[in-house]
Image (cartoon, helix red, strand yellow):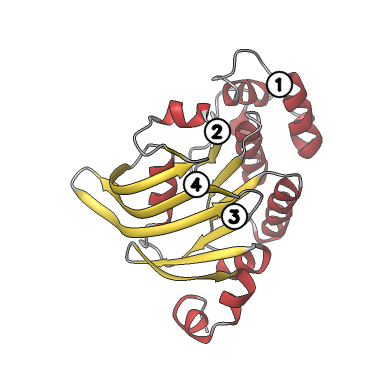
Amino acid sequence: MSLLDIVDLDAGYGDLQVLSGVDIHVDDGEYVTIVGPNGAGKSTVMKTIVGIATCLGGSIEYQGTDISGLSPEEVVRERIGYVPQTNNVFPTLTVEENLRLGAYVLDEMPEDRKRDVYDRFPALADRTDEDAGSLSGGQQQMLAMGCALMLDPDVLLLDEPSAGLAPDLVDDMFDRVDEINDAGTTILMVEQNAKEALRRCDRGYVLANGRNRYEDDGDALLGDEEVRREFLGG
């Protein structure tokens, strides 16, 4: 069943149009990756879904409802989790306080979800009272994911989750995403490490210059000679 449908999307920032006629769909339970060169509009797709960038045309339907005009807070209330590429934790607040803010739209703190986050990311459980700014890059990324998971989202949007991580932490990050998807959360991810992302995902989209270029299963895109030559370094 289709969970998220982006149809003929034009989007951008103010008078700057970045996306032109982009189509992306994500089925319930899928793991979908968006790849492409810098400036292709990948992050703008994410920001438009959550109401940060402006939808200039087309539609974004979530569970059959058009959400393209919603504010970021309204999108979060629809149980759409979003982890930005940068500035995705509050460095002067503790790990615990960050998780509480992740659940701020809920009527009460979901203690069971907090326990689930700590079980999934044990490194955070050992540092609940420490400032998020004292965590390593990998731990901050875990915390950012944990904050988004506090909502028990139906879909988790991840924008470049491996960016800035040490090479030995990248595989661990991808393993965490796999585990979240295996547990039932739908994933839509933008990722700079295109080969690894396509190897792990169900389906992938390649964007260039704000437009769709290719769409197929992850393995099929990895094996496509044109895709490899143009976007994956041969």
* Amino acid type, mark 4: Gln
Check disc 2 and report its element: helix, strand or loop: loop
Task: Tell me how far mark 4 sits from mark 3, CA to CA.
Answer: 9 Å
Q: Are marks 2 and 4 in contact (CB under 8 Å)?
A: no
**Disc with the residue nearer the chain's start (3 vs 1):** 1
**Residue ID for mark 2:** 89
Instruction: Look at 67% across and 22% down and name the residue there.
Output: 96
**Disc with the residue nearer the chain's start (2 vs 1):** 2
Along the line of sight, the residue nearer the viewer: 126 or 145: 145
- Residue 14 screen position, x and y as percent: 21, 42
- Residue 42 screen position, x and y as percent: 42, 56
**Disc with the residue nearer the chain's start (4 vs 3):** 4
Along the line of sight, the residue nearer the viewer: 126 or 118: 118
Check disc 4 and report its element: helix, strand or loop: loop
Kindly identify which numbered label has been placed on residue 129: 1
Instruction: Look at 52% across and 84% down and name the residue there.
Output: 234
Q: Is residue 127 above or below residue 11?
A: above
**Residue ID for mark 4:** 85
